Image: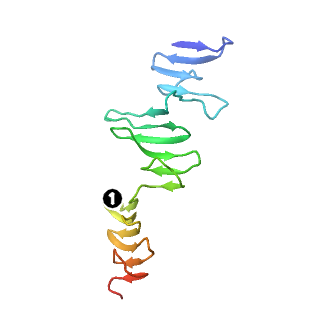
Amino acid sequence: DISFYADNGTTQALFFDASTQRLGLGTTSPSKNLHVYHATTNRPALVESGDADALLEFKDSSTTNAPAVGATGNSLIVQTGSSASERMRIDSSGNVGIGVSSVTNKLVLPNAAYFAWKNNAGSSETIAIRGNTSDGLEFLTGTTRMTITSGGNVGIGKSSPNQKLDVLGGN
C-alpha cells in the first residue's frame, strides 16, 4: 500500500491499495478502481480540459467506439458513434436537444421528429407521433391515422386533407 498525506502529516489524502489495485482520493478504503470522497462537498471531483471539450469516455469489452459524456462550454453533451457525433445536449438554461447541437427551446428534435410507444415485446410501434416533410404532424397506430397540415387542415384516414376537417369515407 502507498499513502500520501496532507500538509499536517496525519490525514491521508491519496491512498493506493496494492492488494485490490484501487486508488482512493480522500478515502483509505476505495471500493472501486478509482474512488473519490469528500465529507463536506457535493462535487468531490472535477474533470477539466484546456481544450474546447472536457469528456469522459466509457468502454466495455465489446465497445469499438467509446461513447462520451461531458461538457462543451456550459452545456452537457453525449457523444456516440465512430465519429464521436453529438447525440444530445442540455444547455445552461435546461433546454434539451436530441440530434441537434443548437438548442433554442425546452425540447428540440431534428426535422421529421418521431415519438413512438412500442408494444410490450418492443417489436412494433403501437402509437407514434411524427413531423412530416411539409411541416405537418401525423398520428399513427401502425399506419398514419390522422394528419394535421401546416395550414391547419385535419385529415382522418387521409394524409393530404383538402379542408379544415377531411374524413376518409365521411361517416
In the depicted structure, whether residue 11 falls above or below residue 117: above
Q: Position of residue 150 (x, y in %)?
A: 43, 70
**Residue lying at the far bottom of the rendered structure:** 171
Is residue 127 shown left or right of residue 90? left
Q: Nearer the viewer, residue 165 or 135?
A: 135
Check the image and name the residue furthest to the right.
Answer: 8
Residue at 46% x, 33% y is: 56
**Is residue 139 positioned above or below 93 on the image?**
below
Instruction: Look at the numbered disc 1 and give the secondary structure of its residue.
Output: loop
Residue type at the position of mark 1: Ala
In the image, farthest residue toward the top: 9
Which residue is located at x 49 percent, y 37 percent? 70
Above or below 150: residue 12: above
- Mark 1 surroundings within 10 Å by alpha-carbon count, few (fewer than 14), some (14 through 19), many (20 or more): few
Q: On the image, which quarter does residue 148 sit in?
A: bottom left
Write down the residue under mark 1. 121
Task: Residue 23 in the image: state x and y as whole percent.
Answer: 50, 21
Please give the name of the residue rendered at 61% of the width and 16% of the height, measured from the top-left corner. 12
Q: Which quadrant of the figure has residue 62? A: top left
**Quick check: 8 left or right of 52?**
right
What is the count of numbered marks? 1
121, 66: nearer the viewer:
66
Q: How is the image coloured?
A: rainbow
Left or right position of 10 against 159: right
Residue 65 lies, with reference to residue 129, above or below; the image says above
Q: Please give the name of the residue rendered at 53% of the width and 42% of the height, measured from the top-left corner.
A: 75
Query: Which quadrant of the rendered structure holds the C terminus?
Result: bottom left
Q: Return the x and y of residue 164 as percentages of the image width and height.
A: 43, 81
